[in-house]
Image (tube, helix red, strand yellow):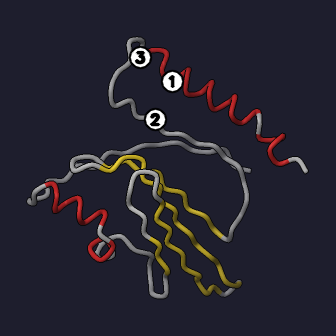
Amino acid sequence: MADARHDESTVRIAVEAPPPRVLAAFVEPERRRRWIRMPGSGARYEDDVRVGGTDVATRTFRLPTGDQRLENRTTHLLVSERRLVHAVAALVDDATEVRWTEQVSFLVPSERPEDDLAHVRGGTRLRLNGLAAAVAP
């Protein structure tokens, strides 16, 4: 198994539209499909754009080696007029592999910002310690 690679990027663009109209392009399915969609045709979409909601897009591709199913899941963590935060997972052929990757953004600094990442990492390790018990018969 290859090691996970981590990276980040920030892209900024100027959009000449008021914030509510920009938000609509992200959250209204008919507007979003104009620019966010699975390639080709025949994809299925389930839309739940609210805090805690998950959008699911699936499509099966016909390849010379057999069918391949692609699923994108977007879970919305924050939805407001001026900020969207969501997590995206891409699944290929329903494969089960546990690889825990977190990207953390601290939007408001804590009293001890030097400790914030250590707290996140420690909490993740504690959570994963219980995984074996959770999957046991």
Q: From the top left corner, tell me how far across and down residue 107 is, in percent.
A: 33, 31
In terms of depth relative to the viewer, which is nearer, 32 or 28?
A: 28
Q: From the top left corner, tell me how far across and down residue 34 is, in percent.
A: 28, 76
Q: Is residue 64 above or below residue 15?
A: below
At a point 49% along the width and 15% down the height, the residue shown is 115
> Label for residue 15?
none
According to the image, label 2 marks what residue? 104
Q: Are marks 1 and 3 in contact (CB under 8 Å)?
A: no
Label 3: how many Cα within 10 Å (few below 14, some 14–19, many 20+):
few
Distance of mark 1 from mark 3, alpha carbons? 8 Å
Q: Is residue 116 above or below residue 26?
A: above
Mark 2 belongs to which amino acid? Answer: Val
At a point 69% along the width and 28% down the height, the residue shown is 126
According to the image, label 3 marks what residue? 113
Q: Is residue 115 left or right of residue 122?
A: left
Q: From the top left corner, tell me how far across and down residue 86 is, in percent.
A: 42, 51
Give SS at disc 2.
loop
Mark 1 belongs to which amino acid? Answer: Leu
Mark 3 belongs to which amino acid? Answer: Pro
At a point 42% along the width and 12% down the height, the residue shown is 112
According to the image, label 1 marks what residue? 117
Q: Are marks 1 and 2 in contact (CB under 8 Å)?
A: yes
Give SS at disc 1.
helix
Q: Is residue 70 left or right of residue 84?
A: right
Give SS at disc 3.
helix
